[in-house]
Image (cartoon, helix red, strand yellow):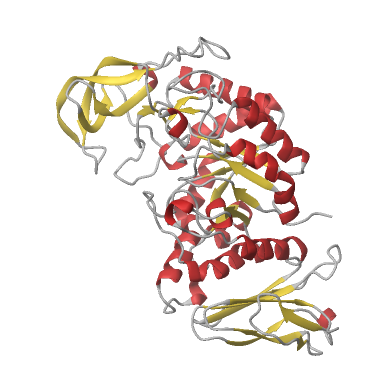
């Protein structure tokens, strides 16, 4: 019997370095499995440029998983290498797969500065050069003195990058492309060419770079035993790089390695094109769905719910869609802030957890809360919805996305999951009742709303239909439950 999968992003941006996350997740492993979590996306585990305070996205040394005294600390923000490996084992022993956050777009915190000839480019148009070429001070030499060549003797210099955003000679911040280099192709077209994101931008056309990153990928999988990858910022990296990287690492490790990429673009056609270009077994986060949920939450009841799934990867390619409500980038205070309003969170999570399309990812900041912004935990709500996904959300789906203020769907259930099947009704305005078909196998049985909208049971008629009610601005989930 195969149960529905649930991924959880087990971190948020502002979480403290104490208690160490690796220790906390190890303790939580059994509870998470019981709650229905089948996989965990853990944050970047390698040493960042700002040491113990680095969330991991300011990558310094990919091989330092909290083992070497670099950037003023041995451990990372999340703990030591041993604690990381112990956490992975505890999760896997509990039946939870572990996905590692892979950040390969850039490096920060170089050990030395180099004199490099470069041209300044327009921040808004990366094809427009500003002024003449000049020699800049580029922080591009990475020797990793604390590691002393352990695991890899590869060191990085300016030849392994194609640009940077800081001239150490004049202390000027600007976009600089190194002379003789080209911005990588096969990237997002925002700003003309969105190869450059931050720090020392890795040159994926450099063969030595490709071979070193594959060596690292194989080492990482074999060292940690992870089950898959979450790829950061793929819109800034050539699709052909990840096509070849994933092929090589999978072939050399013999592991399937589930992979989901973060391509931050609200146009579903762009995401579909990327999936075609990468030519590898990979999924993408459904960014368009996130924005639909966000805009609906901000509309105060004036959003047309019939369109909530329009233009989403969930609809265009449901098998490759990893659906989410929020993440560390959309939470308050972040560059992509677009946090779904609190009142709409139950409806948003019902959409990603109780429908058949997509692989849902629950956000730690919703599950545990975000103390930095006084955002409370929604654990009780999410535990209920996750349990419904695990036990009830199976079988043929029937959609009733037919009213601007009130939509619903049903799942008929299957033989493998006892008492499975459910009916979901969502309203962003006035409440109401929707007559929906849930299956003739339920004729004459009773259903009740586990979300507390209605205190009464309803009876399914001989045609397999029921009149399912929802309150104003809320979600109701009706399940088979005979009166006592």
Instruction: Determine which quarter of the picture holds residue 321.
Output: bottom right
Question: Closer to the camera, 435 or 17?
Answer: 17
Which residue lies most toward the front here?
A: 18
Q: In this view, does 468 lie to the left or right of 370?
A: right
Q: Is residue 404 left or right of residue 465?
A: left
Which quadrant of the rendered structure holds the C terminus?
bottom right
Asked whether residue 313 is in view, the answer is yes
Question: Closer to the camera, 400 or 61?
Answer: 61
Question: Closer to the camera, 216 or 470?
Answer: 470
Residue 329: where, in percent of width, then height? 44, 49
Taking the spot 66% from the left edge, 79% from the top edge, the residue there is: 452
Q: In this view, does 312 lie to the left or right of 440?
A: left
Q: Is residue 90 placed above or below 295 in the rendered structure?
A: above
Instruction: Determine which quarter of the picture holds residue 443.
Output: bottom right
Q: Is residue 230 placed above or below 74 in the rendered structure?
A: below
Taking the spot 83% from the left edge, 71% from the top edge, the residue there is: 419
Q: How many marks?
A: 0
Instruction: Determine which quarter of the picture holds residue 469.
Output: bottom right
Which quadrant of the rendered structure holds the N terminus?
bottom right
Taking the spot 64% from the left edge, 45% from the top edge, the residue there is: 40
Taking the spot 45% from the left edge, 12% from the top edge, the residue there is: 145
Residue 245: where, in percent of width, then height? 56, 29
Question: Closer to the camera, 135 or 24?
Answer: 24
Asked whether residue 258 is in view, the answer is no
Residue 39: where, in percent of width, then height? 67, 46
Which residue lies most toward the left here?
A: 131
Q: Is residue 145 placed above or below 295 in the rendered structure?
A: above
Q: Is residue 247 placed above or below 298 in the rendered structure?
A: above
């Amino acid at each position: 019997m195969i149960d529905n999968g649930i991924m959880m992003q087990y971190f948020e941006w502002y979480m403290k370095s104490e208690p160490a996350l690796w220790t906390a997740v190890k303790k939580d492993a059994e509870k998470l499995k019981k709650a229905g979590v089948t996989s965990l996306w853990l944050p970047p585990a390698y040493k960042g440029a700002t040491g113990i305070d680095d969330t991991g996205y300011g990558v310094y040394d990919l091989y330092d998983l909290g083992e070497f005294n670099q950037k003023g600390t041995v451990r990372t923000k999340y703990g030591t290498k041993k604690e990381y490996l112990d956490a992975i084992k505890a999760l896997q022993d509990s039946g939870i797969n572990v996905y590692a956050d892979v950040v390969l777009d850039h490096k920060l915190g170089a050990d030395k500065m180099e004199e490099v000839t470069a041209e300044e480019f327009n921040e808004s148009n990366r094809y427009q050069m500003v002024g003449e070429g000049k020699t800049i001070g580029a922080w591009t030499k990475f020797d990793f003195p604390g590691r002393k060549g352990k695991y890899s003797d590869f060191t990085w210099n300016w030849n392994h990058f194609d640009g940077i955003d800081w001239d150490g000679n004049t202390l000027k911040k600007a976009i600089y492309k190194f002379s003789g280099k080209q911005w990588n192709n096969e990237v997002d077209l925002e700003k003309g060419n969105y190869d450059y994101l931050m720090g020392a931008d890795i040159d994926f056309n450099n063969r030595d770079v490709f071979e070193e990153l594959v060596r690292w990928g194989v080492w990482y999988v074999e060292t940690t035993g992870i089950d898959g990858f979450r790829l950061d910022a793929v819109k800034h990296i050539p699709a052909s790089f990840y096509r070849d990287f994933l092929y090589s690492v999978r072939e050399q490790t013999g592991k399937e390695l589930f992979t989901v990429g973060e391509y931050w673009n609200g146009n579903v056609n762009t995401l579909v094109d990327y999936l075609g270009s990468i030519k590898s077994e990979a999924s993408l986060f459904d960014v368009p769905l996130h924005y639909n949920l966000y805009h609906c939450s901000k509309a105060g009841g004036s959003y047309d719910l019939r369109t909530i799934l329009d233009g989403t990867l969930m609809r265009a390619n449901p098998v490759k869609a990893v659906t989410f409500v929020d993440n560390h980038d959309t939470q308050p205070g972040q560059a992509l802030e677009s946090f779904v309003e609190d009142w709409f969170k139950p409806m948003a999570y019902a959409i990603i957890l109780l429908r058949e399309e997509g692989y849902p990812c629950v956000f730690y900041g919703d599950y545990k809360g975000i103390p930095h912004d006084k955002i409370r935990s929604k654990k009780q709500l999410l535990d209920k919805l996750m349990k419904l996904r695990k036990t009830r959300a199976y079988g043929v789906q029937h959609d009733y996305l037919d009213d601007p203020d009130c939509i619903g769907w049903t799942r008929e259930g299957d033989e493998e999951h006892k008492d499975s099947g459910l009916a979901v009704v969502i309203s962003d305005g006035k409440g109401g009742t929707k007559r929906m078909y849930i299956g003739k196998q339920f004729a004459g049985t009773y259903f009740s709303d586990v979300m507390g909208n209605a205190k009464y049971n309803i009876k399914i008629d001989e045609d397999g239909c029921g009149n399912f009610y929802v309150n104003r601005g809320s979600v109701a989930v009706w399940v088979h439950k005979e009166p006592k």
